[in-house]
Image (cartoon, grey):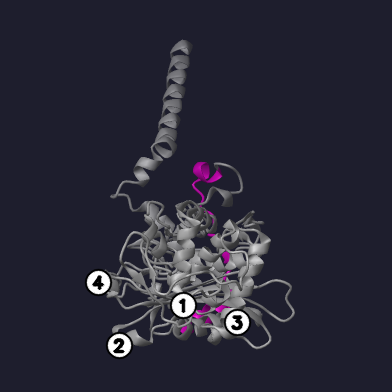
Amino acid sequence: MTRNIRHAAVFCALLLVALVVNAARVQIGQKPEYDDNPANRRPDIARYQQPRGDILVGGRAVTGSRDTGEHLRFERTYADGPMYAPITGFASQAYGTTLLEHAEDGLLSGADPMLAPLPLWNDVTGAHNPGGDVVTTIHGAAQRAAFEGLGGRKGAVAAIEPATGRVLALVSTPSYDPQLLSGNSAAATRTWKRLNADPDKPMLNRAVSRTYPPGSTFKVVTAAAALEAGVIRDLDAPTRSPDPYTLPGTRTKLTNEADGCRNASLREAFEWSCNTVFAKLGVDVGVRGMTAMAEAFGFNDDGLRVPFPVARSTFDTSVDRAQLGLSSIGQYNTRATPLQMATVAAAVAGGGQMRSPYLVERTLRAGGSLVAAAGSRPSREVMRPSTAALLKELMTGVVDKGTGAKAAIPGATVGGKTGTAQHGVGNSGTPYAWFISWARGAGDIEPKVAVAVVVEGTASDREGVSGGGLAAPIARAVMEAVLGG
């Protein structure tokens, strides 16, 4: 009898062990399979059962959460949604997440293992941590100045702190209110369809996801290449450039908008944006030298993230000499994001040193303790300090007595470069107005901000599209905001 009881006890213990092992297999081993099953709503219910962490600008939350009282309980809210949409993106119960909401989703939702008190603690206990907060590098006043400066026009602004790589402003217009996509109602569905059907593409982040021909702003890169290669040694020496310039191997004659470009010095050519001079300089430097300089500035880099991906800016490496001439004035296949061109200006402002741009300063737990900080970003040398000093001199001349006069700030040193980029078959498209710049306040040792602005002109103002007229005043407003604190 005793032996039978002992056998039954052992059998029950084995059944208990089998039950525990099976439960562990289902709870841990098969958890991903069940979580990914479309019929399982538990992950969604758990995900929206608590408020989401916030995205902060200057210590102020520009996101929030609203209790709906439904199964998917908390919906995302946004303060100044259209202004900050190119940074936050959206967090939607129906359509997922984008931009910072996507890149930092684990932390904001509370799912990041870094938020757990112990490794694997949440997997074992089933607990869910409160969402953490993301502190951005954005300068609120600069962001507003860029957004209001663009107004109703299509375009984008990117601003960087040259010494660190901190992104100070990132604006794209037209924009949208991400809060209208937060829920899963019929209204959210209608908004989604409307935004996707809009020909102006308000959900496109033009600052980082669209590339444009940079036009004459690319002449900063060409000037750097010519100085580094020794093709130019004296800013004021004649460049022996014809006007018009016949592109090598063709009968195509390149001309200028400005007068006085024949044999102009680099200083004169830069101030008045002489196409003929810079196309010839690019050809004289050669494909290898121009490619090396463009790539040193960040062109042809597929891996830039801020932390969301940035579209690849391109400089074509398989061009003939005629195509190289056009590429060297920011045409042909040369394409750049506004963030890339802000980085070009920042490298000049930084004395030839470049730091990768970044948007997240630090991440915090719900109680305010630190999860991770950006830390110091390594710099790389784009050009010699002496070359950067000469480019600063050239860019300052554009604002002091050239095409960028509308970017001047009383009491500050401002350097800039205008650009009006042609595009389309036979240059039939409405030009893009560009301006890139940097500024140093009267009491500053080094420039505090570098900016790139692009404005997409309209057919009605085609004749009035210019970087100095449309884009430079916006850049000035952004620089003033940063210099003013």
Question: Hey, which quadrant is residue 257 in on the image?
Answer: bottom left
Query: Marks 1 and 2, Cα distance to the nearest angstrom?
Result: 26 Å
Question: Hey, which quadrant is residue 130 in on the image?
Answer: bottom right
Query: What range is drawn magenta here?
Result: 121-149
Q: Is residue 441 left or right of residue 465?
A: right
Q: Which mark is residue 412?
A: none
Which is more foreground, mark 3 or mark 4?
A: 3
Kind of residue indicated by mark 4: Ala
Residue 468 in picture, x, y percent from top left? 48, 83
Mark with earlier residue (3, 1)? 1
Residue 160 in picture, x, y percent from top left? 57, 69
Secondary structure beneath label 4: helix
| Residue ID for mark 2 | 460
| Residue ID for mark 3 | 481
Q: Residue 197 carries which label?
A: 4
| Residue ID for mark 1 | 83
Kind of residue indicated by mark 1: Met
Query: Marks 3 and 4, Cα distance to the nearest angstrom?
Result: 35 Å
Kind of residue indicated by mark 3: Ala
Say which of 284 and 222 sits in front: 284
